[in-house]
Image (cartoon, grey):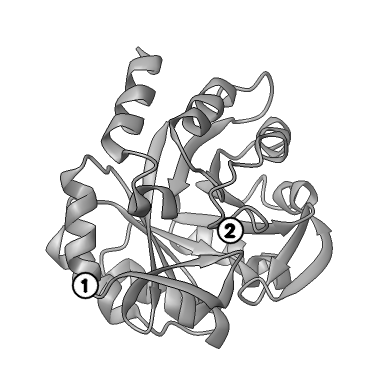
Amino acid sequence: MLIIPAIDLKDGQCVRLRQGRMDETTVFSDDPLQTAGMWLGQGARRLHMVDLNGAFAGTPINAEIVTSVTRAYPNLPVQIGGGIRDIASVDFYMEAGVSFVIIGTQAVKDPEFVRQACRSHPGKIIVGLDAKDGMVATEGWVDVSEVSAVSMAERFADCGVAAIVYTDIARDGMLQGVNLDATVELAEQSSIPIIASGGIAKLADIVDLKAASKTKTGAGIMGAITGRAIYEGTLDLGEAQNYCDREEN
């Protein structure tokens, strides 16, 4: 299981939000490139980047920063989400050296777009499902749909999606622990590997996720995204990854 550090970009800075609220922002660094190098140095094997401005604008805003990271660290796989609503944006990021593109809002609004992206870039597309009380939210988590995360995941079972990032919005940035029950339920019912996100606070949360990563049915949990916990020091990135590695041996 991968432990994936997050770099959320707002106005060119590395920030963390609470429950996705742009007015609940903590700035951790004004140098995303340096931050990416820091996480790589601590053992990161993949980096999760989110263009928060892009998520609200509906088009990439911080793409230049993302490109600078892929150029500086070509051996560090990067997955990027936020504001990716058309195939031109997907193509741009692929050409910029990004390993995976995350489609969130547009996956809910236009599932065919995901199929198109998967055909154009096989194995490179991740679907982001962000949920409030189990219902998928879009437009930077502002609009809550009437579609459950489990039902939405089923729509992409035969698309060739590489993974699903599942975020419990109520837990995101709150350091209250991951929503294990909802994450495991999705992992058990999905044929697509799940990347857990939202609320990870300490190593115990990783232990719980790792124990649940091999579900009896479904594709299981392949990774966990962590942000505030590693920035504030309640979770050590290297220790968490080493734990997962040991448990797999």
Kind of residue at disc 1: Asp
Q: Position of residue 186 (x, y in %)?
A: 70, 39
| Residue underneath mark 2 | 128
Kind of residue at disc 2: Gly
Q: Residue at x 67, y 18 (%)?
A: 216
Q: Residue at x 47, y 41 (%)?
A: 224
Q: Residue furthest top?
A: 249
Q: Position of residue 194 (x, y in %)?
A: 57, 41
Which labelled disc corresponds to residue 31?
A: 1
Examine the image and state in which quarter residue 94 appears: bottom left
Q: Tell me the quarter of the image containing the C terminus.
A: top left
Left or right of residue 172: residue 79: left
Q: Residues within 10 Å of mark 1 (few under 14, many from 20)?
A: few
Q: Earlier in the sequence, mark 2 or mark 1?
A: 1
Find numbered disc 1 in the image and state the secondary structure of the residue it sits on.
loop
Q: Is residue 138 above or below residue 35?
A: below
